[in-house]
């Protein structure tokens, strides 16, 4: 009996260590791989409805280190980044008003040309993961799907271009925004990638709330 336990003991230690490591991976998963695959989307959706304190425990950060920009907006910037196409994007927790409802990535480029090139690469990555966006090309002059839009950005002085995909996972959607604003010697060249719960599903976390509009309504069966 003693010899049997002696032989099995190292294996028990290995199994225990593996189990603990797996548990550790489930908690404090602060960096997701963009664009989210089905596992990442599922994990994100387990966070919807959590308080800022719950998120601090889940992602191992201090609330005191967060910065709300602008004040009262419910957008809390994390002091950590995630790498997307070789660029360090900041992460922002979106709260509505005090419950987690989404995650935003943002990167500020140095020029309109850099923003256009990076946006085109990321847009291609998203198309590969999620296929066609929600809106039809030409339904708005500002859609990223419109022909020649990235060439237009390279010399733009002002503009906002966007696209949306959904549903991602079960109750999420993704929006990509490119903002360019140039005045005299100052300029803004930002790319924002935002995963959020679709408004028509927010009632799951705030019972009784009614969405003012539905982004991706579910078709009723006949």
Image (tube, grey):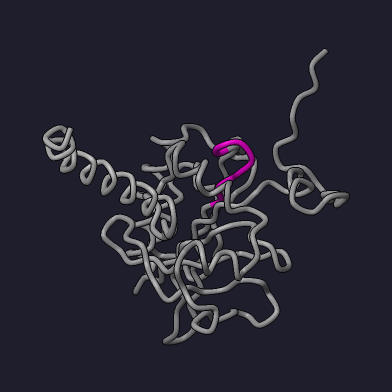
Q: In the rendered view, does 211 fall on the left or right side of 33?
A: right
Q: For the point 74% across and 29% down, which residue is it?
A: 218
Indicate the quadrant where residue 90 lies.
Answer: bottom left
Indicate the quadrant where residue 194 lies.
Answer: bottom right
Quick check: is 27 in the magenta stretch? no
Q: For the point 34% across and 74% down, which residue is it?
A: 110
Query: Given the current orientation, which residue lies at the most extreme bottom position?
Result: 185
Q: In the rendered view, does 97 fall on the left or right side of 90?
A: right
Indicate the quadrant where residue 97 lies.
Answer: bottom right
In the image, residue 74 sits, relative to residue 146, either above or below, namely below
Q: In the rendered view, does 16 fall on the left or right side of 76?
A: left
Question: Could you tell me residue 186's position as x and y percent?
Answer: 44, 84
Name the residue nearer the viewer: 146 or 202.
202
Quadrant where the image shows the N terminus: top left
Name the residue nearer the viewer: 182 or 11.
11
Q: Which residues are magenta?
A: 168-175
Q: In the rendered view, does 60 fall on the left or right side of 44?
A: left
Question: Could you tell me residue 193's position as x and y percent?
Answer: 49, 56
In the image, residue 189 sits, relative to residue 22, either above or below, namely below
In the image, residue 216 sits, relative to residue 220, either above or below, namely below
In the image, residue 194 sits, relative to residue 53, either above or below, namely above
Name the residue nearer the viewer: 47 or 221.
47
Question: Could you tell me residue 77's position as x and y percent?
Answer: 51, 74
Question: Could you tell me residue 142's position as x and y percent?
Answer: 57, 52
Quadrant where the image shows the C terminus: top right
From where the camera sits, is residue 137 visible?
no
Q: For the point 79% across and 54% down, which residue is it?
A: 206
From where the camera sits, is residue 51 visible?
yes
């Amino acid at each position: 009996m003693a010899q049997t336990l002696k032989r099995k003991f190292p294996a028990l230690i290995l199994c225990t260590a593996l189990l603990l490591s797996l548990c550790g991976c489930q908690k404090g998963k602060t960096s997701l791989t963009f664009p989210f695959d089905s596992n990442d989307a599922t994990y994100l959706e387990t966070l919807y409805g959590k308080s800022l304190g719950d998120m601090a425990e889940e992602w191992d950060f201090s609330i005191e280190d967060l910065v709300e920009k602008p004040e009262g907006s419910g957008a809390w910037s994390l002091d950590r980044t995630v790498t997307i196409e070789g660029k360090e994007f900041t992460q922002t927790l979106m709260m509505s008003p005090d419950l987690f409802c989404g995650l935003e990535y943002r990167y500020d480029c140095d020029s309109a040309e850099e923003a256009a090139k990076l946006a085109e690469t990321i847009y291609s990555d998203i198309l590969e993961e999620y296929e066609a966006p929600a809106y039809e090309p030409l339904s708005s002059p500002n859609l990223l799907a419109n022909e020649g839009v990235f060439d237009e950005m390279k010399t733009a002085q002002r503009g906002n271009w966007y696209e949306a995909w959904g549903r991602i996972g079960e109750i999420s959607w993704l929006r990509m925004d490119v903002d360019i604003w140039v005045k005299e010697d100052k300029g803004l060249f930002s790319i924002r990638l935002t995963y959020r719960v679709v408004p028509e599903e927010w009632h799951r976390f705030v019972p009784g709330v009614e969405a003012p509009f539905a982004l991706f309504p579910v078709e009723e069966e006949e």
